[in-house]
Every structure is written in C-alpha cells, then in structure tokens.
Image: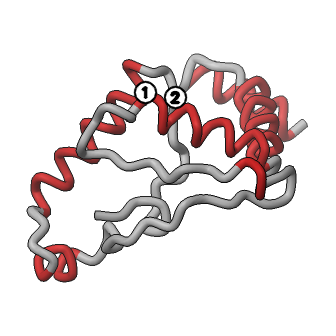
Amino acid sequence: QLARLANEWSRNNLGCNITVVVDEFGAKLWEESNYEVEAGHIWNFGRNFAEDPNVKIPQVYFEHSGRRVITMEWIEGVKSTDLAGMRRAGIDVDAFTRNGVQAALRQLLEFGLFHGDPHAGNVFA
C-alpha cells in the first residue's frame, strides 16, 4: 500500500512512475557493483575526453581487473575539496571549477553519459 501511495504522489507531483525510477536505480546500482562494467565506463570516459587537455581519466589495467576488482593508473593531484591546497599548488580554483562544470555538461549532453559519483576521491586538480 505504501508503494501505491508513493507512486500516486509521484505521478501527481513529479509526472513520473516512481516504480520505474526505483527499478532503474536498482538495475544501475547492481550494474555498478560489477567492476568489469565500471571499467568499461571508465574506458568510454577516457576515450571521450582523450583530446581535452583539461580532463584526465585514469587508464584501466584490464589485465589486472575483473568482476570484483578494478586496477587503474595512479594519478597525483589535490582533492577537489582542498581549495587551499590547490592555491598552494598554483591551481586557479575558478578555472578548475569552470573546467569541471564544462566536463560534466559535455559528458551528459555531448556523450550521453552521467557520472553519478563525483566526490573528492574521484575528482582531483
């Protein structure tokens, strides 16, 4: 009954079927737990941004990766949340932010991909 009420509210207020959204979310969450799939996504991101000097996607070492582990190139950098560290490293924080927004928009609008986990452990300057 709770699912029925949530779906009714969702249709009336959001214009969508909440069960479809929850099912899609569950499928994607399960897909993300397979590191072979994740490695393919990283490879696609790398290929898409290969010519962009402002974006560096780590190389995946497929021969050392599998369903339960992913091995990637180590990239040195400053965490995206460490503004003082970026300034000490001579990084223009405003330019870094602009580049991040542009990259996010390109991945979504140009490449049709979405990075749903852009936290400080995934984004470096």
Q: Which one is earlier in the sequence, the residue at label 1 or at label 2?
A: 1
Q: How many marks?
A: 2
Quadrant of res 40 = top right
| Viewer-closest of 65 and 112 | 65
| Viewer-closest of 68 and 115 | 68
Residue 58 x %, y %: 50, 53
Q: Amino acid at mark 1?
A: Leu
Is 121 situated left or right of 20 in this image? Answer: left
Label 2 neighbourhood size at 10 Å, few (<14), some (14-19), many (20+)?
Answer: some
Label 1 neighbourhood size at 10 Å, few (<14), some (14-19), many (20+)?
Answer: few
Residue 33 x %, y %: 80, 51
Q: CA distance from mark 1 to mark 2?
A: 5 Å
Q: Residue at x 82, y 44 (%)?
A: 30
Disc 1 vs disc 2: Cβ atoms closer than 8 Å?
A: yes
Q: Tell me the element at label 2.
A: loop
Q: Which residue is mark 1?
A: 108
Q: Residue at x 31, y 38 (%)?
A: 103
Is 116 situated left or right of 27 in this image? Answer: left
Residue that lies at the very extreme toward the right in this rendered image: 1
Q: Which mark is residue 6?
A: none
Q: Amino acid at mark 2?
A: Leu
Quadrant of res 93 = bottom left
Name the quarter where the C terminus is drawn. Answer: bottom left
Q: Residue at x 32, y 45 (%)?
A: 55
Residue 60 x %, y %: 62, 50
Q: Which residue is mark 2?
A: 113
Q: Is residue 10 above or below residue 69?
A: above
Q: Is residue 98 above or below residue 113?
A: below
Residue that lies at the very extreme toward the front in this rendered image: 63
Q: Residue at x 40, y 60 (%)?
A: 123
Q: Tell me the element at label 1.
A: helix
